[in-house]
């Protein structure tokens, strides 16, 4: 059965503008949810936990504390998923599924769900960008500048800059380090967690990444040479993604000339690789959920079930890997492929030598 690609390709500039507007709304939604959830933790820890602790045993308090400790990331993810249902995200013109993230479609120009080509870019090749050296290349003393912080790294740096000082302040203010009473420690930990939620998801996203980039550049923490920046958008792309896709991770323009290779029978089937990656992600999450249920119910034979499940997981994983015909090492540069399956799924190339490893016309059988 052949899969027919749609000829209705979306313009890359329109796609980026639309995703930027939607992501701005989602970002404010997440910020508001983080402030509400963090405030709830702060209020419960300060005013209610000490009153509730008298209503149950210490074991019950500990179990409830573990539930509350694991609840905030689950709730934030749940809020995010609910928000996705009401956002008008672009849909793939081939399979009709929503594109919730700009990456990897922005770089591969393909749908991450069906691998169909969905984006077109008329800007062509944009010369002037120099790919940073990897650690291995730097150790071999090749010419060029070394790896530096990119825009995503600057965005991630906002969390320790804001959340860590706030949490340390709350630890000192509540006297947590001087209190060895477990019941009081739980109450104070809720206050610290609430402050961490507000700092990580409520305050850090409010800081402009472009503002931090300008500050770091003035402090000589970012490269001064123009070849480190994308000549189209003026931002520092993520080197790993640019190396494997040839495009800027911020605007999608082509920065590197990639090897033009034809499909060969020994290449990896994209569908089978996708099945392997989905199995690899979903099953461990399911395993953790089962383990938590068994621990809470105190089932004695559950350890044997875990062992049998793990053996079955390894058998199925090995079968899917053989079915996808994924080599243990890249046939061109001998780099291990185990840690690069997600990049291989999204871009179809080796992250070291850029050679093509995945079939493009996998739909034709």
Image (cartoon, helix red, strand yellow):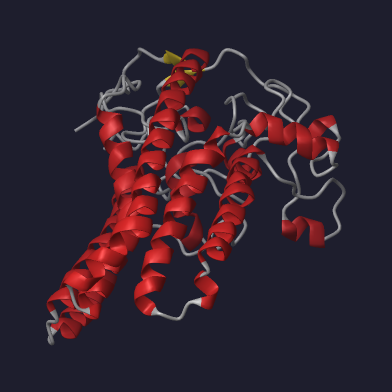
Residue located at (59% from left, 33% from top): 249
In this view of the protein, which residue sits in the foreground, 91 or 160? 160
Tell which of 21 and 73 is nearer to you: 73
In this rendering, position of residue 294 left or right of residue 151: left
Q: Could you tell me residue 102's position as x and y percent?
A: 46, 30
In the image, is residue 90 above or below residue 110?
A: above
Residue 295 as seen in the image, left or right of residue 5: left
Q: Could you say which is closer to the camera, residue 290 or residue 32?
A: 32
**Relative image position of residue 131 (x, y in whole percent):** 73, 40
Q: How many marks?
A: 0
Q: Nearer the viewer, residue 208 or 104?
A: 208
Residue 342: x and y in percent read 44, 50
Instruction: For residue 262, say whether it is visible.
Output: yes
Relative placement, left or right, of 24 versus 215 is left
**Residue 155 percent coordinates (x, y):** 60, 40
As drawn, the residue found furthest toward the bottom would be 300
Residue located at (43% from left, 35% from top): 31
Residue 73 visible in image: no
Asked where in the image residue 341 lies, by quadrant, the reply is: bottom left
Q: Residue at x 35, y 14 (%)?
A: 7
Q: Quadrant of residue 52?
A: bottom left
Q: Quadrant of residue 292?
A: bottom left
11 up-or-down from 82: above or below: above
Horizontal relation, residue 346 to residue 335: left or right: left
In the rendered view of the protein, which quadrant contains the C terminus?
top left
Residue at 77% over, 56% down? 137
Q: Quadrant of the N terminus?
A: top left
């Amino acid at each position: 059965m052949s899969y027919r690609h749609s000829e209705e390709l979306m313009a890359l500039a329109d796609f980026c503008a639309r995703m930027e507007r939607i992501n701005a709304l989602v970002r404010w939604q997440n910020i508001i949810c983080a402030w509400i959830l963090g405030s709830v933790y702060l209020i419960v820890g300060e005013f209610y936990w000490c009153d509730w602790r008298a209503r149950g045993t210490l074991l019950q308090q500990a179990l409830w504390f573990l539930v509350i400790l694991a609840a905030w990331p689950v709730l934030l993810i749940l809020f995010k998923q609910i928000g996705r249902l009401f956002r008008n995200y672009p849909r793939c013109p081939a399979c009709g599924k929503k594109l919730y993230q700009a990456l990897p479609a922005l770089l591969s120009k393909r749908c991450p769900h069906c691998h169909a080509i969905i984006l077109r870019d008329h800007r062509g090749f944009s010369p002037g960008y120099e790919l940073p050296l990897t650690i291995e290349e730097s150790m071999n003393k090749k010419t060029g500048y070394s790896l530096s912080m990119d825009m995503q790294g600057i965005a991630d740096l906002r969390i320790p800059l804001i959340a860590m000082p706030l949490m340390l302040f709350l630890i000192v203010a509540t006297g947590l380090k001087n209190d060895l009473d477990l019941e009081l420690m739980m109450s104070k930990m809720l206050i610290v967690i609430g402050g961490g939620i507000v700092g990580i998801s409520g305050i850090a996203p409010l800081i402009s990444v472009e503002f931090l980039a300008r500050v770091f550049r003035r402090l000589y923490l970012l490269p001064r040479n123009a070849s480190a920046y994308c000549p189209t958008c003026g931002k520092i792309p993520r080197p790993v993604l640019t190396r494997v896709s040839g495009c800027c991770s911020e605007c999608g323009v082509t920065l590197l000339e990639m090897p033009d290779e034809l499909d060969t029978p020994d290449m990896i089937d994209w569908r089978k690789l996708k099945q392997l990656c989905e199995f690899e992600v979903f099953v461990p999450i399911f395993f953790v959920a089962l383990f938590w249920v068994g621990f809470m119910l105190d089932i004695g034979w559950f350890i044997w079930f875990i062992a049998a499940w793990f053996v079955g997981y390894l058998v199925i994983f090995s079968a899917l890997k053989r079915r996808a015909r994924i080599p243990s090492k890249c046939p061109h540069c001998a780099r291990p492929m185990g840690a690069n399956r997600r990049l291989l799924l999204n871009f179809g190339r080796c992250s070291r030598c850029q050679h093509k490893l995945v079939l493009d016309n996998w739909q034709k059988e």
